[in-house]
Image: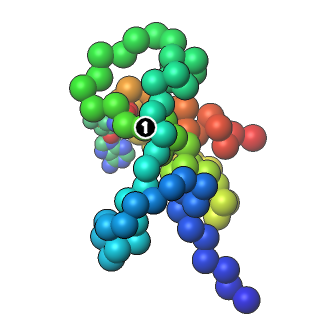
Amino acid sequence: MLSVKTFANEYTRKPGGIGDKGIILFPDDTKLRREVLPVKVAHPAKNSLYMYRAICEYGASFGHKIFCDPMAGGGSMMYGASEVAD
Ligand SMILES: C[S@@+](CC[C@H](N)C(=O)[O-])C[C@H]1O[C@@H](n2cnc3c(N)ncnc32)[C@H](O)[C@@H]1O
């Protein structure tokens, strides 16, 4: 039987979001960011490292392990991809 994987299943959701699937409440990533990306990057739109990790884990769960961010942003995708690297 085909099983459906839920994205970022380990995180709490509050009601709402597109199709009422819930809004994912990723934890504050300040401490994690300091640990894994110690060089301060003055990027104006850093997203949650937990979100990027969840994106990469979700992709990897289907066997997809190539993630592309051509300009590297604040390094968040690099961290997410490194978490699922072989
Ligand atoms: C405004 S920055 C956001 C950075 C991100 N919030 C973070 O915390 O690292 C946008 C990033 O998306 C990447 N990007 C833009 N268009 C893309 C595409 N079509 N495919 C993959 N990455 C893309 C850029 O290289 C850039 O690093």
Which quadrant is the C terminus positioned in? top right
Which quadrant is the N terminus positioned in? bottom right
> Whole-percent x and y of residue 84?
67, 43
Question: How many numbered marks have been drawn onto this rendered protein structure?
Answer: 1
Query: Which quarter of the rendered image does ligand 1 occupy?
Result: top left
Does residue 70 show up? no
Q: Residue at x 45, y 33 (%)?
A: 28
Q: Residue at x 67, y 80 (%)?
A: 3
Question: Which residue in the rendered view is the most extreme toward the top?
Answer: 39
In this view, the residue in front, 26 or 35, is 26
Q: Is residue 5 above or below residue 29?
A: below
> Whole-percent x and y of residue 68?
46, 43
Quadrant of residue 83 within the rendered picture: top right
At label 1, the amino acid type is Ser
> Whole-percent x and y of residue 38?
51, 12
Q: Does residue 79 appear left or right of residue 71 in this picture? A: right
In this view, the residue in front, 56 or 66, is 56
Mark 1 residue's CB less than 8 Å from ligand 1: no
Question: Which residue in the rendered view is the most extreme toward the left?
Answer: 44
> Whole-percent x and y of residue 81?
58, 39
Q: Does residue 59 appear left or right of residue 48 in this picture? A: right
Q: Residues within 10 Å of mark 1 (few under 14, many from 20)?
A: some
Q: Is residue 67 above or below residue 72?
A: below
Does residue 39 show up? yes
Q: Residue at x 46, y 10 (%)?
A: 39
Q: Residue at x 55, y 25 (%)?
A: 32
Q: Secondary structure at mark 1?
A: loop
In the picture of the structure, the residue carrying the numbered disc 1 is 48
In this view, the residue in front, 14 or 60, is 14
Q: Is residue 22 above or below residue 54?
A: below
